[in-house]
Amino acid sequence: MKRLRYFLEAALLAILFVFFRILPPETASNIGGYIARTIGPKLATSRKARRHIQCALPETTKREQDNIIKGMWDNLGRVIAEYPHLERISKHHTNIVDLANLDQYINDKTLPIIFIGGHLANWEINGAATLTQLNHPIDLTYRAPNNPWTAKMLTKARTLNGRIKAYPKSRESGRLIIKALKEAHSIGILIDQKYNEGVEVDFFKMPTMTNPIFVQLCQRYKCPLIPVRNERISGCNFKLTAYPPLTLFKDDGTPRPVDDVIKDAHILLEQWIKERPEQWIWLHHRWKE
């Protein structure tokens, strides 16, 4: 039964990808957003999103929560529709700002960078634009869906047909990331998903488990840890903002506590989400229920 469900899910995604691929990126994004914002708020899973919004943003009214949920589904629908157009969107519809925070690191071909971000706007643009606009080699980590056929299609899209390496999150991926860093390949990591074996750090004043690997690797290999914010400005047009590297070491050269660095990263994520709450995935199991 599960195999049949996986097959039907993959078949539907394949049909959608073919349909969206033949459309211009803006049209595909608009249609994907319309479909998702029409259907999504009616699904039972939207109740989970509302609970998370109420806990993280307790000051919001019911109408504001409704708008956030509708906007979240609109954004998710657009993300699906934009997969077949990732290369074009990342190159021609994305504005990278505050490059001064990147220049000295990008120009050093021997120094890898760990970029961190969250599932905001179209998060797949982050890695794609790093390659298509900056011509900077980058490998990605991701959480693979349970459906292997769906996972294969999404991986092909996010890696721009294999031009970017991508590692599904696992114990093996840690070894591959270390190998990539030693080869001066930068790494892109999304840090806003729960990791049960991680460290407990507050996120929106609620305890949550976060994978500390992005801090530990930066401190071990002396590479900069640069937050990148992704915003959907309109339709399929995006703005990527590179922030100054997070502080990894104390004045005496010893590593800062991992928890403290993660707190700094969480503060940035919270700020980004509060400013554009409809562009984050409130469906994630980020906190203990």
Image (cartoon, rainbow, N blue to C red):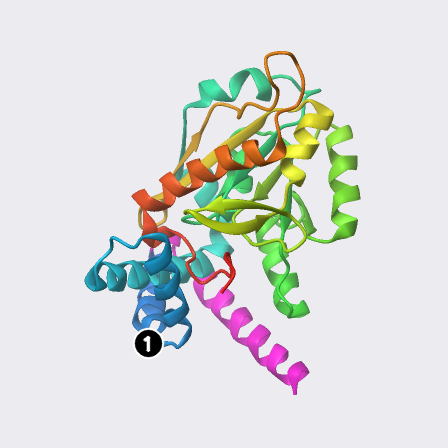
Residue 238 visible? The answer is no
**Which is nearer the eye, 102 or 219?**
219
| Membership of 2 in magenta stretch | yes
Q: Does residue 141 appear anywhere in the picture? A: yes
Residue 18: within the magenta? yes
How many numbered discs sit on the rendered protein?
1
> Is residue 86 depicted above or below 80 in this figure?
above
Query: Overall secondary structure of the magenta stretch?
Result: helix
Task: Tell me the SS state at disc 1.
Answer: helix
The amino acid type found where label 1 is placed reads: Lys
Span shown in magenta: 1-26
> Mark 1 highlights which residue?
42
**Which residue in the rendered view is the most extreme toward the bottom?**
1
Up-down: is 263 above or below 124?
Answer: above
Check the image and report above or below for 3 versus 228: below
Is 111 displayed left or right of 243 in the figure?
Answer: right
Q: Position of residue 206 (x, y in %)?
A: 45, 51
- Taking the spot 62% from the left edge, 53% from the top edge, the residue there is 195
**Whole-percent x, y for residue 98 in the image:** 41, 23
Task: Where is residue 168? Give x, y as percent.
Answer: 68, 53
Above-or-below relation of 158 to 49:
above
Question: Where does the N terminus fall, quadrant-wise?
Answer: bottom right
- Decide: few, some or many residues near mark 1? Use Cα within 10 Å; few <14, some 14-19, many ≥20: few
Rendered residue at 37%/70% (across/down): 46
Q: Given the current orientation, which residue lies at the most extreme top position?
A: 252
**Quadrant of the rendered image containing residue 222:** top right
Q: Is residue 179 left or right of residue 33?
A: right
Corner quadrant of residue 241: top left
Image x and y of residue 2, in percent: 65, 82
Q: Nearer the viewer, residue 279 or 251?
A: 251
The residue shown at (50%, 65%) is 17
Point 62% across, 77% down: residue:
6
